[in-house]
Amino acid sequence: MAADLAAVEKLVHDAYEPWVEVVGMRPLPMEADYGVLIAAGRVHVTDPLDGLVVLVPEDGVLLVENVAVSPERQGRGVGRRLLAFAEEEARRLGLPALRLYTNAKMASNIALYESLGYVVTGRQGIEGRSAVLMRKELTR
């Protein structure tokens, strides 16, 4: 578990480090307790470990809490595959929708989510950051 935890934490750090300057602080996924998330079965990784998604079932929706892809693999469809996995997981759990939030300054991420059918549902301040809230309704 310790080796897995270290690898997950490194992946998240490497994926989000370029955003620190853009956002003006560490993005929220860099602050998460991955030991707790792994133990809870929330972290789903690719094999080999070049990406991960953190999924949290909620009442009527699956929260996509984090999508992280190693810098070397970004732009190669890993994130899209992880989001497709999230949709499959929501369907498996009988949840009709997914939701996520991302920093308002992460325009490329917002554009990706919109291209995959997510719609902006609002904005919210989260721990000193400006978040864009997004949702995707699943078709049966």
Image (cartoon, rainbow, N blue to C red):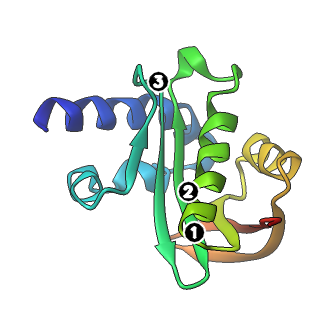
Q: Are marks 1 and 3 in contact (CB under 8 Å)?
A: no
Mark 1: which amino acid? Leu
First reached walking from the N terminus: tag 1 or tag 3: 3
Q: CA distance from mark 1 to mark 3?
A: 22 Å
Image check: 38 left or right of 110? left
Q: Position of residue 91 (x, y in %)?
A: 63, 63
Q: Which residue is under mark 1?
A: 62
Q: Position of residue 65 (x, y in %)?
A: 51, 59
Image check: 60 left or right of 137? left
Q: CA distance from mark 2 to mark 1?
A: 8 Å
First reached walking from the N terminus: tag 3 or tag 2: 3
* Pointer 1 local density, CA inside 10 Å: few below 14, some 14–19, many at least 20: many
Q: Is residue 113 visible?
A: yes
Q: CA distance from mark 3 to mark 2?
A: 20 Å
Of badges 1 and 3, the one in the foreground is 1
Of badges 2 and 1, the one in the foreground is 2
Q: State the image quarter where residue 92 is shown.
A: bottom right
Image check: 47 left or right of 76? left
Q: Which residue corresponds to the image point at 52% horizontal and 38% vertical from the top-left? A: 68
Q: Is residue 127 visible?
A: no
Of badges 3 and 2, the one in the foreground is 2
Q: Are marks 2 and 1 in contact (CB under 8 Å)?
A: yes
Mark 2: which amino acid? Glu
Tell me the SS state at disc 3: loop
* Pointer 3 local density, CA inside 10 Å: few below 14, some 14–19, many at least 20: many
Instruction: Locate the N terminus and report the quarter of the image it occupies.
Output: top left
The disc label shown at residue 89, or none: 2
Q: Which residue is under mark 3?
A: 50
Tell me the SS state at disc 2: helix
Tell me the SS state at disc 1: strand
